[in-house]
Image (cartoon, rainbow, N blue to C red):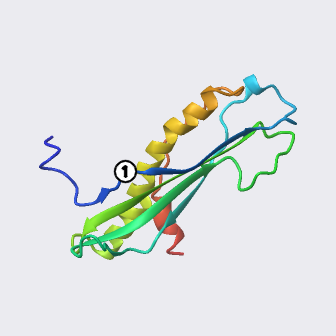
Amino acid sequence: MDTQKNKSNFSFIPPTLVESIFIENPEYKGDFCSVKNLKFNLNTSVEKPEKNPANSDQNQAVVMLTLATANDLEFTENDACYLRITMKSKFVWQKDSYNDNEVDSLLKINAPSLLLSYIRPQVVSLTENSDIPTQHVPFIDFSQNIFKDKN
């Protein structure tokens, strides 16, 4: 496949790391080495699309994705650690290239999927240097993001 010929009209500015936190729980009662897969929560934030000030023929929107082991930093004796990583990027597309439903899908499915691919190595890096076994983030079906807003 020719990547130049098949290049998407929907593009992104290289994602940036907004936050990266790893804290080992000093009160953890278990054996850190026996920690299996951490449970992760994901939160996607999508700004309302607007005209790109740098190019009036384009629209843009910023999308942020946060992966965390908990909503807040409160440990119980069963929590081995707290991990939170947020990445963001600006997504840009030509006006009139997509209808509103297509833009919604691109921003709520494709954009978080892309951001998660940047978060994955961060999770590996933070956990491989800790007392818990290296963690890997599984594939996520972001198509459910579309249905959240429609109910």
- Split into 4 quadrants, where in the image is the N terminus? top left
Placement of 48 over or under 127, stated as above or below: below
> Could you say which is closer to the camera, residue 9 or residue 139?
9
Does the rendering let one see residue 138? no
Residue located at (49% from left, 75% from top): 150
Q: Mark 1 highlights which residue?
A: 14
Residue located at (87% from left, 40% from top): 77
Residue located at (84% from left, 34% from top): 28
* Crowd band around label 1 with a 10 angstrom C-alpha radius: few (<14), some (14–19), many (20+): few
Q: Return the x and y of residue 118 as percentages of the image width and height.
A: 45, 43
Q: Amino acid type of disc 1? A: Pro
Residue located at (46% from left, 51% from top): 16
Q: Return the x and y of residue 49 as percentages of the image width and height.
A: 38, 74
- Corner quadrant of residue 8: bottom left
Give left or right: position of 40 versus 25: left
Give left or right: position of 100 versus 26: left
- Corner quadrant of residue 151: bottom right
- Corner quadrant of residue 125: top right
Q: Residue furthest top?
A: 33
Does the rendering let one see residue 13? yes
